[in-house]
Image (cartoon, grey):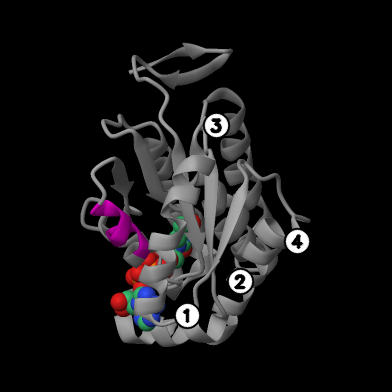
Amino acid sequence: MLSSFQGKLARNGDERKPVICIEGNIASGKTTCLEFFSKTSDIEVLTEPVAKWRNVRGHNPLALMYQDPQRWGITLQTYVQLTMLDIHLSATSAPFRMMERSIFSAKYIFVENLFKSGKMPEVDYAVLSEWFDWITSNVSIPVDLIVYLQTSPQVCHERLKQRCREEEKVIPLEYLESIHQLYEDWLIKRTSFPLPAPVLVIPADHDLQKMLHQYEENRDKILAASQV
Ligand SMILES: Nc1ncnc2c1ncn2[C@@H]1O[C@H](COP(=O)(O)OP(=O)(O)O)[C@@H](O)[C@H]1O
Ligand SMILES: Cc1cn([C@H]2C[C@H](O)[C@@H](COP(=O)(O)O)O2)c(=O)[nH]c1=O
C-alpha cells in the first residue's frame, strides 16, 4: 500500500531502513556477494528477479531481447523497470536491506547501452525515459549506499561462460566492455547520470576466497556508511 510522504508516493507504515545496492557488470559476482551477506541475520537480501525476466506468463523476455534487441529491448526493459520498482517498494523486516542492482542501473546502464549501441529505436528510449522520469519524480526510492564490484570485462566473460546461463551464451566480450564503460562513467568518473547514493568500490577480479575475505573486512564499513 502506498501513501504520500514529502510529496512522493512511499511505502505505507514501514520504518525507513538503510538500503544498500550491489552494482556491477554481468557475472561480476553480485549474487555471490549477496549470498555471503545473507548469512548475517540483520541484513535482508533481495536478489535480482531474473527468474521473472526469464518467465512472464510463459514468455522469456530476457531470451527474446538477446535474440532481437531492436524488437524486444523495450519489452524486457519495461518489465525490468516494473519488477525493480516492486522490489524497491517491498516491505522489510530486517534492520538493513541489501539488493542486487536497482531501478537506476537498469535505466542508466542497460537501457542506455541498448540505445547508444543503436539497438533501441529512439521512440522506445523516449517512452522508457518518460516512465523512468515519472517514477523517480513521484515515488520515493531511497538508496543509502552503492557497493560497486569493479571487475574487468575479461574476468566477467570467463565467469559468465562458467555460469552458462542459456540466454547469455550469445553475449560477446564487447557487450561486457560496453556495460563496464557505462558503469565506470556513472560510478567512477561520475560524468553520465546522477548518483542516488555514495559509492564504495570493491575490486572484484580476485578469486572467491579473497573476495569473501574482502566482504568480511568491509562489512562494518558498509553497514555504517549505509546508516541514514
Ligand atoms: N571471485 C570469484 N572468482 C571466481 N568465480 C566467481 C567469483 N565470484 C563468483 N564467481 C562465479 O562466477 C559466476 C558469476 O557469479 P555471480 O555471483 O552469479 O555474478 P552476478 O550475480 O554478478 O551475475 C558464478 O558461476 C559464480 O560462481
Ligand atoms: C538489470 C538488467 C539486466 N539485464 C540482463 C543482464 C543479464 O543477462 C541479466 C542479469 O544477470 P546478472 O548476472 O545479475 O548481471 O539480465 C538486462 O538485460 N537489462 C537490465 O536492465
Q: How far is disc 4 from disc 2 in space, using C-alphas?
A: 12 Å
Q: Quadrant of residue 51?
A: bottom left
Closer to the observer: label 4 or label 2?
A: 4
Residue located beneath label 2 in the image: 180
Q: Secondary structure at mark 4?
A: helix
Q: How far is disc 2 from disc 3 in space, using C-alphas?
A: 26 Å
Identified by mark 3, the residue type is Ile
- In the figure, 192 relative to 142: above or below? below
Question: For the point 71% across and 49% down, which residue is it?
Answer: 193
Residue located beneath label 4 in the image: 189
Residue located beneath label 1 in the image: 156
Q: Nearer the viewer, residue 52 or 103?
A: 103
Q: Secondary structure at mark 3?
A: helix
Closer to the observer: label 2 or label 3?
A: 2
- Residue 32: % across, % down: 33, 67
Circle 3 crowding by C-alpha within 10 Å: few under 14, some 14–19, many from 20 = some
Q: Earlier in the sequence, mark 4 or mark 2?
A: 2
CB under 8 Å between discs 2 and 1: yes
Q: How far is disc 4 from disc 3 in space, using C-alphas?
A: 26 Å
Identified by mark 2, the residue type is His
Q: Secondary structure at mark 1?
A: helix
CB under 8 Å between discs 1 and 3: no
Give the residues in magenta: 33-39
Closer to the observer: label 4 or label 3?
A: 4
* Ligand 2 contact, mark 4 (Cβ < 8 Å): no
Q: Quadrant of residue 133?
A: top right
Circle 2 crowding by C-alpha within 10 Å: few under 14, some 14–19, many from 20 = many
